[in-house]
Image (spheres, rainbow, N blue to C red):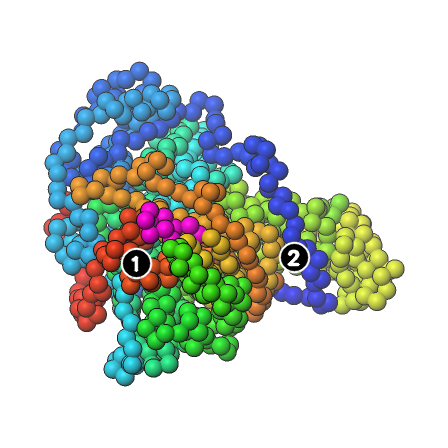
Amino acid sequence: MDNPHLISPPITRNVIGKRVPRSEDAKLLTGRGKYLNDINVDGQFHACLVRSPAAHARISSIETTQAEEFPGVHLVWTASDIEEFCPGIEAQFSADGCLPMTMPLLAKDVVRYVGEPVVLVIADTRAIAEDACDLVNLELEQIEAVLDPRASIQGGPVANGERPDNVGIRGRATFGDIDQAFNEASYVASALYHPGRVAAAPMETRGCLADYDWTQDRLKLWVSTQMPHYVKLCLSLFLGFDESRSEVLSPDTGGGFGQKAHVFPEEMLMPLASKHLQAPIKWVEDRRENLLAGSHAHEQFVTIQYAATDEGKVTGVRTHALVDGGAYHMPPQTMAVESWCSVAVTPTGVYDIPATEYVYEAAVTNKCPMGAYRGVGYMAGTLARECLMDDLARQIKISPFEIRRRNVVREFPWKNPQGIDFDEGSWLATINTLEEMVDYPAFLKRQEEARKEGKYLGLGISVFVESSGESTGMLQAHGMHEIYHDTATVKMDSTGSVTVTSGLNSQGQGHQTTLAQVAADVLGVPFEAISVDAGTSTKGAYGSGTVGSRAGVIASGCVNRAAHAIREKLVAVAANMLEASAQDILLEDGAAFVAGAPESRLNIADVASAIYWDASKWPEGFDPGMEFTRAWDTSRPMFSNGGHAMIVELDPVTGFVNVEKVFSVEDCGVMINPTIVEGQIRGGVVQGIGLSLFEQLVYDKAGNLSTTSFLDYQTPTMDVSPPFEIRHLETPSKISASGVKGMGESGLIAAPAAVLNAVNDALSPFGTALYELPATPEKIVRATQGTVDLDGPVDWAELWDRAAAPVLDRGSMEMQ
């Protein structure tokens, strides 16, 4: 299914590639959007949760009498009230070494992180529910909290009894002669990088509204999610709701960034409570709950080693990625989303390195579970590869551009050491374009002059390759067994207007605009004739989720195939009406006409009307159906690529870092809408600057989260958003329908490496470098004083042996 059914003559690209204004924006910018909290149902009650105040403790008792008797309270549930309906939600990914775990809807017997749901309270209003929660008496017996993933993964106190060895995932692999590469190396560069723990922090927090109709045994669930069909599947798998009698609706969604690509306990609790009370139940979390329990992201300890020749050609790379996975797997992706993605998906990046060896691990700790966030896995892996490449360049005294040119893959198709095929790419062109944009000789001169004045400028670059348009082919190429399933429906009415329904919903990416552009070109109708429903209900087309930079690729592929089926009908009838061959019919600008004879033309609306109402215009044996649902997937992976360069100014006295300018190069194949692509780049890069310089979720020694509001957890705002210069390269995909590739995560994948490289370049006169993010003012000042806090790399042989150790089964430690 790599290529949709195409007909001759080829489609003219009239709308794809144009900067069409986003059709969503008028509604959203004038306050007419309808988000989860804007939706209300008559007779609804409101939910609030008592959350664990302890990182790890046994539940001695829960006294709920006062809460139950509080005026306006309708229900108070603990784990014992719901375990007969659902003991928990299990997540298991087929990545090698990923071990199953079950997340309870409400903690039973033991709490395992601060913020874990323990008691559900349903009341007339949110305020009453919150007051009743304060009346619940929760008695806890403290257990030692497991907080350091480096200690946890080596055994000791148990964070979760389902995994008595504290291992959530563990695997290793070798490709090529790695020992020879290191034995014969002239240079060995090593480092340990530690990107910190962060939150996706979408503007709209999580929430859902469940409405069970007992008269028809039907459930409606409005939920702020990136995966409505997966939520619907979980309602059936874990709660027993019939899929045919359940509808999940995703209204306007104020950002997701991966955090909403999970199913959460709260989203399963509300349907249960609605069915029990025979009333609608609404839950919307506040910001404190979101930061405590909405899934965390990115924190890893990544050890990396390069073996290189005298000229700086890297011949082997070893990588170990350890993620702090928290107390449970987050369904469906599990802890594999970070450590496995960091080293096992593209361990060599854009570089032609013949040998690679890697180990990936996830440590179970008593913290909020680790989940997906934009650039998941790729960010930490790219950080390690790109920052160590700069370290190697400094060792052999060549420029950061030259070291990359000496190692980058130059010819395609190319197969990496794992045997994964890369059909095309502009990897060398990206490096050269960044160097030209920066004007590297001019920058070096300016940097030297600035240092004489006590100003410290730094330049950092980072190039990347991303497995984009996440698909079945991508998973299979990496030895996994999950299947994606996505469809779109396209319908043309008798007046020539078109309705497109996608199975992939939008969280602000611009699906209504881009999918309309695709359909308009296939059908030859004006952009304004297309109406797009971007997955607002699971009653329409099917979708496996808006994740992994896949909507632009997969959704457009589905739309392309469904629209082609209608195009064939239009062409057949137009040919009959114009007494021409179907091979000579063109559809453009709202008209059907004969190639070479544009005066022989019909309005497409008239052709559509004939299909609906005038059988005399039909060719023999014609089927007049004008609504088609089509699926699309890929049998192999596709890859986008690009890079960023950043210039920063560092103040050695205050430790503050100012990002002066960002240079970005993006190759996502054919761009459907360049304005939307550039918006994605800017947004992702600014998020990368935030987590690189000041975003950090901080736990104290008892496992309490200290950063529970935006006063403490600092997200990037417009005052830290630098000027951008963006250039586009275009290497069309050989796989996708219109040559497009995904790019939604590219900004955040590579930006942190560029920031850290720039900071370390600015620090070079002080003879120190940082290996930990965020690069806060305190760390910068310590670095200028010659102090770096992070431990050095651990012993590789020890890591390799540990990864081969047998994993303990579930045993007698279930209560931990």
- Label 2 sits on residue: 16
**Quick one: which residue is furthest to the right in this view?**
599
| Viewer-closest of 342 and 506 | 342
| In the displayed structure image, the side of residue 579 where residue 632 appears, left or right | left
Look at the magenta stretch and give its main secondary structure.
Answer: loop
* Residue 657 included in the magenta stretch of the image: yes
| In the displayed structure image, the side of residue 287 where residue 522 appears, left or right | right
- The amino acid at mark 1 is Leu
| Mark 2 crowd level (few <14, some 14–19, many ≥20, 10 Å Cα) | many
State the image coordinates of residue 185 (x, y, percent, origin top left): 29, 81
Which quarter of the picture shows residue 264?
top left
- The amino acid at mark 2 is Ile
**Numbered badge on residue 307:** none
Asked whether residue 801 appears in the rendered view, the answer is yes
Range covered by the magenta-colored residues: 650-659
**Quick one: which residue is furthest to the front in this view?**
452
* Residue 352 included in the magenta stretch of the image: no
Q: Residue at x 47, y 23 (%)?
A: 42
Nearer the camera: disc 2 or disc 1: 1
Q: Residue at x 49, y 77 (%)?
A: 410
Asked whether residue 163 appears in the rendered view, the answer is no
Q: Earlier in the sequence, mark 2 or mark 1?
A: 2
**Numbered badge on residue 770:** 1
Which quarter of the picture shows residue 192?
bottom left
| SS at mark 2 in the image | loop
Q: Residue at x 27, y 69 (%)?
A: 190
Distance from Cα at disc 2 to Cα at disc 1: 43 Å
